[in-house]
Image: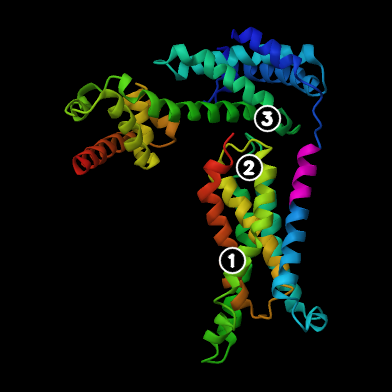
Amino acid sequence: MKTDDFIAMLANEAPPVDRRAPGRRFALALLLGFAAATVLMAAGLGLRPDLAAAIHLPMFWLRISFAACIGLAALWLTLRLSRPGVRIGARWASLAAPIAVAWVGMAVVLAGAPHGTRVALLLGHTWRVCPILIALLSTPTFLAMLWAVRGMAPVRPRVTGAAVGVLAGATATVAYCLHCPEMSPAFWSTWYLLGMAIPGAVGALIGPRALRW
Amino acid sequence: MDSSAITATSPTDRDTDVLSATETQLRACFVLGLGGDAAQYRLFLHGLGSHLRAYLRRRLPRAQADVEDILQETLLAVHNARHTYRDDQPLTAWVHAIARYKLMDFFRAHARREALHEPFEDDGSLFVQSDVEPADARRDVGRLLDALPDRHRLPIVFVKLQGLSVAEAAQRCGISESAVKVGVHRGLKALAARIRGSS
């Protein structure tokens, strides 16, 4: 087909564009993913028994905001990455900042802990299962966000896949906070982060295939 | 000069004027097109098409026959992705990212499909010695190239298959010229080792 004819054909198939459709699609994917992760957590793992008391502890909210900050940063980066020609550059720092703050917290806690209790603070009681459970809970958000991003035009599919994975992991972690009994910053700034890194790595692996357009 | 709208190379003052004039004009048509104005949208596609054609011709010196195909593919991509444009973003940056994505896509497919149609220059002896059927060999070269890391594969694709200069390849990959030369050298060495290993 001649290019001029092709252009005429495209111009004839150009209804007005709903500029808010991408936002709605992302919001829907995130809400569905978070709701599914919460239901899975409540049904499969159960809320922690002392949740009513725990919500009065500052550490409970500090822990949730660690996951929420990483999630917000990953969401922001995902939204930018799914549009061609939108730069990221120094904005990666938004993802690094909550991690750096948590690690400083971990260092302070470990430095102040009596000798011999440090390993216990770091490993808690659930370090073996924590990252795996978070990775499993991230599945609904992961799939929903892949669907949302596939409706956009990511020109860096591998990086975008990784951002989607971290976002899914962070969403799952927020839900997991309602189950998890571990309160030490040394624990959660290590194992929660690993739990988010697993879907992040999966996203980087499958991004080039799953997000091709 | 009209293609300056979609290149990112340091523009002179005159280029900058042309660039911003094109940006303003095309963007106005495009935004009206997004609102459903088919005539303006067609003007935008026409304007964009001529810029893209010049852009692609310069980047595909050995594949002029493919230019119209890639041009149409890129226009279709722009059309299908038009809802991803952000109002606060330069249209040039948005279009350029899409064009580059589609061009890289073509290079990848082209390297797999056409690997043996291109002259190999003095490094050709590596492949000439092979005695398998040409069709098998072409498929195998594509597969072998795919196994290389990007820092080796891209220099080979650009310099050896596309026939670009080392400087152009360096700019395209975003690495230094010496890194391109090293990439070609090591990549061909790795390919030779693989071929010896598998035969």
Q: Is residue A86 above or below residue B125?
A: below
- Per the model, the C-alpha gap separating discs 3 and 2 is 13 Å
Q: Quadrant of the C terminus of chain B?
A: top left
Question: Crowding at label 3, few (<14), some or many (≥20) Cα neighbours within 10 Å?
Answer: some
Q: Is residue A4 above or below residue A72?
A: above
Tell me the chief SS of the magenta region.
helix
Give the residue type that dot 2 points to: Leu
For the residues carrying marks 3 and 2, which lies nearer the camera in this image? Answer: 3
Q: Secondary structure at mark 2?
A: helix
Identify the residue position indicated by label 2 in the image: A81
x, y percentage for residue A162?
57, 51
Q: Is residue B58 above or below residue B100?
A: above
Decide if residue B65 is on the left or right side of residue B167: right
Q: Which mark is residue B16?
A: none
- Say which residue appears at 52% left-offset and 92% top-offset: A115
The earlier-in-sequence mark between 2 and 1 is: 2
Q: Which mark is residue A195?
A: 1
Q: Secondary structure at mark 1?
A: helix
Q: Secondary structure at mark 3?
A: loop
x, y percentage for residue B79?
68, 23
Q: Is residue A180 visible?
A: yes
- Per the model, the C-alpha gap separating discs 1 and 3 is 33 Å
x, y percentage for residue A71?
69, 58
Question: Crowding at label 2, few (<14), some or many (≥20) Cα neighbours within 10 Å?
Answer: many
Q: Nearer the viewer, residue B72 or B84?
A: B72
Part of the protein shown in magenta: A21-29
Identify the residue position indicated by label 3 in the image: B81
